[in-house]
Amino acid sequence: MINIQLFGNNLQKIGYTFYTGVPCSFLKSLINYAVNKCEYVGAANEGDAVAIASGAMIGGRKSVVLMQNSGLSNAVSPLVSLNYPFQIPLLGFVSLRGEPGLSDEPQHELMGNMTTKLLDLMQIEWRYLASDNNEVQSQLLLANSYIERNKPFFFVVRKGTFSEEPLRTELSSPNFTPFKVNKNKPDEKPSRYEALTLINALKNEKTVQIATTGKTGRELYQIEDHNANLYMVGSMGCASSLGLGMALTRKNMDFIVIDGDGSLLMRMGSLATNGFYKPPNMLHIVLDNNTYDSTGGQSTVSDNVNFVQIAAASGYTKSIYIHNLEELKASIQEWKEAKQLTLLYMKISQGSKKGIGRPQIKPCEVKERLQRYINNPTSSM
């Protein structure tokens, strides 16, 4: 059995102080250690946790992601379409529920048989975490060597691996009264290109812009390809979780997440996580055209959803319905003056800019130049 205090302290010594994940009984001692001794962000699901940890890694924090193996399937999308193309390394711990030959609940049987095969398919290097304290130390150094080469590394954790660690610190979020502005006039529905042009024009040297998957990133790239832009590819719904990890890590910078209705609907639990941790330096803008524009304009169900009310109920300090570009400009400027976690929601027209191309820069290059920019924004302009 591993001494959790010794293990956690050794992780800290090689730089791992940021944790995020979804609980599992096999990992409870490591999670409790992270809550007690480090910075831990509880995610709504495992895919969000991967994106949060990835944002923290981009921001310069070595990050650990924790999950039950049943949740590994939830994390596949960001692992293969965010971490792989952007070359974002993570240190992962995944429990082995349903281990072959051991008795467990029936829902774990199939995943227990395929956990390591799934990691292999995703080209993620992994090891079973040893139960010997001395052997574990060499395993951690091996894992760290992969992280330093921009490659993820996962440990598969069997039942009873860690010694007990009682939870001493409870996570809490302060009580507050959210500020809301609901719809009170007709929507002007500008184009997405017009909205993005305005948002981009208001940035300064401390602004990082994260554009969600699809036409949003492609149009922002056409408006201005900038060192402080990140264009999401794949990993649909993970934009604000990535932004959360960055915002919690780099509090000297401003992070504007530009989301879409289809994307946000896919991982709406992220609103609750964002609202709990409330990074004041994150602005979440939702441009809603009620369609999946990149795949042919099929309708989303956003017309049946009140994002302003949901964000307010989820803990966003401000949630504002935007009716036109003038209000969008005023609200962004207000946020820059008095930063609080804010959601701005605006309906836009359907369709996209004709003839837009795709970014001609590799995702890993986008990540690398963004990291340089965050570290020295003035010299990277």
Image: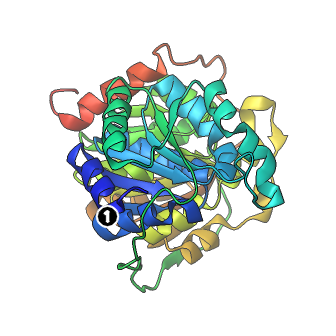
Mark 1: amino acid: Lys
Residue 145 horizontal/vertical position (percent): 32, 27
Residue at the spot x=53%, y=76% of the render? 180
70 above or below 291? below
204 above or below 381? below
Q: For mark 1, what is the residue?
A: 339
Q: Which residue appears farthest toward the top when viewing the image?
A: 360
Please, which colouring scheme is shown? rainbow
Q: Can residue 240 be seen from the camera position used here? A: no
Residue at the spot x=42%, y=33% of the render? 89
Q: Is residue 310 left or right of residue 133?
A: right
Residue 73 in which image quadrant: top right
The N terminus - image quarter = bottom left
28 above or below 379? below
The C terminus - image quarter = top left
Q: Along the line of sight, which residue is nearer the eye, 362 or 318? A: 362
Q: Is residue 371 left or right of residue 261?
A: left
Residue at the spot x=28%, y=66% of the render? 37
Label 1 CA crowd tier, 10 Å (few <14, some 14–19, many 20+): some
Residue at the spot x=72%, y=52% of the render? 98
Q: Is residue 91 left or right of residue 137?
A: right
Residue 294 horizontal/vertical position (percent): 72, 30
Badge count: 1
Residue 195 horizontal/vertical position (percent): 53, 43
Residue 133 horizontal/vertical position (percent): 34, 49
Q: Along the line of sight, which residue is nearer the eye, 162 or 292? A: 162
Helix, strand or loop at mark 1 = loop
Q: Can residue 80 be seen from the camera position used here? A: yes
